[in-house]
Amino acid sequence: MIPNNQLPYRKGVGIMLINSNNKIFVGRRIDNTKAWQMPQGGVDDSENLETAAKRELKEETGIFSIKILKQSKKEFVYDLPEELIGKIWNGKFKGQIQTWFLIQFTGKDNEINLKQKKAEFYEWKWTNINDLPKIIVPFKKKLYQDVIKEFESLLGL
């Protein structure tokens, strides 16, 4: 068995989805009812990052009416809390290294459908960007603050 500190990071993507009012999409996780997060997920071996971001967004929210505004210049890393290592991703990873996308939602809210094959969220809402770091799980707070900084010029902050 590999010690936790020697486990690799999972390669992933994250999506900051904004609506026409510059509100951010967040979903409340099924497996942690207190946790809100932006859509995110792993990158398959044969996938490029943009394709992975579109796929993850569609798989988690049903959303397909989008326009990609920007891909992050850097990768963002987070570590899982010790108590989650071994429970998530079959214990293969200690966290994720992610490329983030700022994506404009161009559809209507009735396009959003959380009842997906492998549902991750049971509730969703549009939130103000300033509230985002307050409502997510503590171990992702710094990452979210860094992602906001990365995209702030396009968000009018």
Image: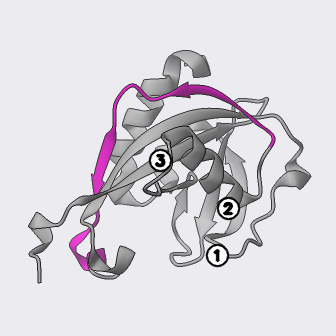
Residue to which mark 3 is pinned: 13
149 on left or right of 114 = left
Q: Earlier in the sequence, mark 1 or mark 3?
A: 3
Q: Is disc 2 placed on a helix, strand or loop? A: helix
Q: Earlier in the sequence, mark 2 or mark 3?
A: 3
Residue at the image position 42 percent from the left and 60 percent from the top: 137
Assess whether residue 74 is covered by the magenta stretch.
yes
Specify the quadrant of the image occupied by residue 18: top right
64 on left or right of 144 = right
Q: Amino acid at mark 3?
A: Val
Q: Amino acid at mark 2?
A: Glu
Q: Amino acid at mark 1?
A: Lys
Please provide the residue range marked out in magenta.
65-85
**Disc on res. 118:** 1
Residue sitting nearer the eye, 93 or 149: 93
- Up/down of 108 relative to 71, above or below: below
Residue 112: where, in percent of width, then height? 81, 56
- Spatial distance from mark 1 to mark 2, Cα to Cα? 8 Å
Residue sitting nearer the eye, 34 or 70: 70
- Spatial distance from mark 1 to mark 3, Cα to Cα? 17 Å
Residue to which mark 2 is pinned: 59
Assess disc 2: are there few (<14), some (14-19) or many (≥20) residues with their C-alpha within 10 Å of its C-alpha: many
Residue at the image position 46 percent from the left and 46 percent from the top: 133
Assign the N terminus to one quadrant of the image: bottom left
Is there a contact, CB below 8 Å, between mark 1 and mark 2?
yes
